[in-house]
Image (cartoon, rainbow, N blue to C red):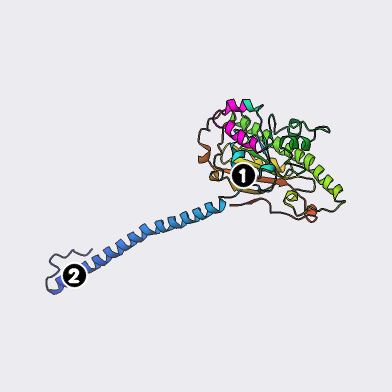
Amino acid sequence: MSRKLKGKIGSKGLKGALLRHQAKIKMVKNIESKQKHELRKKSPNTNNKKVKKNQELQKLSQEKVIPFEKNETLMLCGEGDFSFAKSIVEQGYIESGNLIITSYDNSVNELKLKYPHTFEENYQFLKDLNIPMFFQIDVTKLVKSFKISRNNTWFRTINRLSDHKWGNKPLQNILFNFPHNGKGIKDQDRNIREHQDLVFAFFKNSLQLFNLINTKVQDDAFRYTQGYDLNENTPQSKKLTNEGYGNIILSVFDGEPYDSWQIKLLARKNGLTLSRSSKLQWQNFPGYHHRRTNSEQDTTKPAKERDARFYIFSKYISNSSKRNRKSDDGSDSDSD
């Protein structure tokens, strides 16, 4: 190891020259060290800015991802305080004449007691628009809940409640926000099983209702046009299979226990395939409040602080059937 030289940098001779040389090297090293330090400081910031910019762009691209079209028909299942229904109408995501609202609760009075600060205003807003609202509708027994029969058809009931706005339109979308049986079961395995039963039955009964309603619409149109499909390019006829099946939409929170429900597997067991999924952007639905099934209180963690997704399922079509009809979109794809 070299011996450290003593003396002044300004002194003459070899010793002074060596001291000046060592000082110069030290100064260069200090400058390089500072430059590297500055680069290390700037580099993460630059990356963070790029990441932040990409996130903002991604967020903007997702902000208006709505799982149904404005000119399509939609039935909401299991509405709580009716705030989601009010929000999508106010935001212009759905035409009031294309919307049907259902509730598992028994009556308007029951919902007023359950949601004393929010329900009545939402209900009155929707009622003033003559939007049909049904109570005591069980998603696991849809056809039975609507009391559909030969004498009491779906269209007669809907048109009576909606001031004849519905007409003879098909039902294209059925949406169930955040399925929950309201039992508060603490045993996690049992809780998961019962919610799987709920979602499975919802899929099965939605398909039954689609088939019952839409095959009649298609048969009537076929007879009226003598076999010519005059409406094949209209929005009302799109997204329906030849059997009259439309889209079934679920919104579900991310994480457990919801991941263990395995909704995609439950869908496949009902002959459904995932057409599309997208992140639920809470800011798209101002005024919408996710409520408990038994009270106006929010969940333990506010819903808007939790990640959730929309899942859009459609009836599986075999390759032979696909060759006979146009496909509107792909399957098993995420919008984000």
Q: Disc 1 and disc 2: Cα gap in Å?
A: 71 Å
Which SS does the magenta portion mostly show?
helix
Question: Whole-percent x and y of residue 129?
Answer: 65, 39
Q: Position of residue 245 (x, y in %)?
A: 75, 45
Residue 6: percent from left, percent from top: 14, 64
Q: Which is in the foreground here, disc 1 or disc 2?
A: 1
Return the residue nearer the eye: 189 or 146: 146
Does residue 115 show up magenta in the picture? yes
Q: Amino acid at mark 1?
A: Phe
Picture quadrant of residue 106: top right
Q: Residue at x 56, y 36 (%)?
A: 290
Report the side of 54 relative to 223 (left or right): left
Q: Is residue 226 left or right of residue 335?
A: right
In percent of the image, x 61 and y 41: which residue is there? Answer: 251
Residue range corresponding to the magenta coloring: 110-129
User: Which amino acid is tagged 2?
Assistant: Arg
Q: Secondary structure at mark 2?
A: helix
Residue 259 appears in the picture as rendered: no
Report whether residue 315 is seen.
yes
**Is 32 on the left-hand or right-hand side of 144?**
left
Q: Residue at x 70, y 44 (%)?
A: 73
Q: Quadrant of residue 75?
A: top right
Kindly state the secondary structure of the residue where label 1 is placed.
strand
The tag on residue 81 is: none
**N-terminal label among 1 and 2:** 2
**Quarter where residue 35 is shown:** bottom left
Q: Residue 20 got which mark? A: 2
Q: Where residue 310 is drawn, which disc sits there? A: 1
